[in-house]
Amino acid sequence: MSRPELYITIVVGPNCDMEAFAIRSTLEYFGARVTVHWIGRPNDLVDVLSGKELDQRCDYLILAFHGDEGRLCMPELGEDVYEPDEPRGEFFTYLDVKRHSNLKSIKVIATGCTLGEEKLAKAFLECGCHSYIAPTDYINGNSALMFVIRLMYEMINNKKHQQEAFEIAKSIDGETSVYQLFE
């Protein structure tokens, strides 16, 4: 097997499995090595964001989650099911990101609505990630999928730098224009 074009980790939130399957299949076809983490509880996400369960080699971390008002939608568990110190509730906020993340030099892409909210983006950057890309408004799921695929296509197949690939992917249509790149 030849060396992969990129090493990509996809973290899949509740009800985002079809998006994750489409992204994974396409990126593997493009020549990327893709690892998937399925989130069943908040500590699963904490383990990835903290680096405990993140692959040693990771160029891009794709957060395939629904979002609402700058928060990642999480599975809500019964109070007796949560582990000690596990984030509780239906959302993972910028404060949770600050508390639990250690993403040295990793490029993060979030697909969910409003996950480009400035507080969340700054939290990821403060936790060491190289860049953070996400939609600043509510976005159609098909458009979010197309944005990620076009971004990766331009970088892998056309050897574009992230900034140039971002501009191309953002220009697909009015929906994809809500994506923002934070560095």
Image: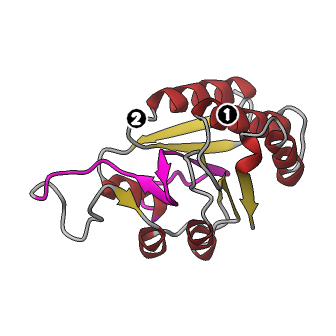
The region drawn magenta spans 50-79
Query: As rendered, which of 170 and 153 lies closer to the eye?
Result: 170
Locate residue 68, reporting x and y percent: 47, 53
**Label 2: which secondary element:** loop
Instruction: Give the quarter of the figure containing the N terminus.
Output: top right
The answer to whether residue 120 is visible is yes
Residue hosting label 1: 143
Q: Nearer the viewer, mark 2 or mark 1?
A: 1
The question of residue 72 being in magenta is answered with: yes
Please tell me whether the stretch drawn in magenta is mainly helix, strand or loop: loop
Residue visible at 86% across and 48% down in the picture: 167
Q: Which residue is drawn at the image coordinates 87% and 41% (left, top)? A: 168
Disc 2 residue type (three-letter): Asn
**Relative height, residue 4 to residue 96 (above, below):** above
- State the image coordinates of residue 27 (x, y, percent, origin top left): 67, 30
Residue 46 occupies which quadrant of the picture? bottom left
Q: Quadrant of the C terminus?
A: bottom right
Q: How is the image coloured?
A: secondary structure
- In this view, which residue lies farthest toward the left? 80
Q: Is residue 160 above or below residue 114?
A: above
Q: Which residue is mark 2?
A: 15
Instruction: State whether residue 79 is above or below residue 125.
Output: above
- Label 2 to label 1, Cα distance in Å? 17 Å
Q: Residues within 10 Å of mark 2 (few under 14, many from 20)?
A: some
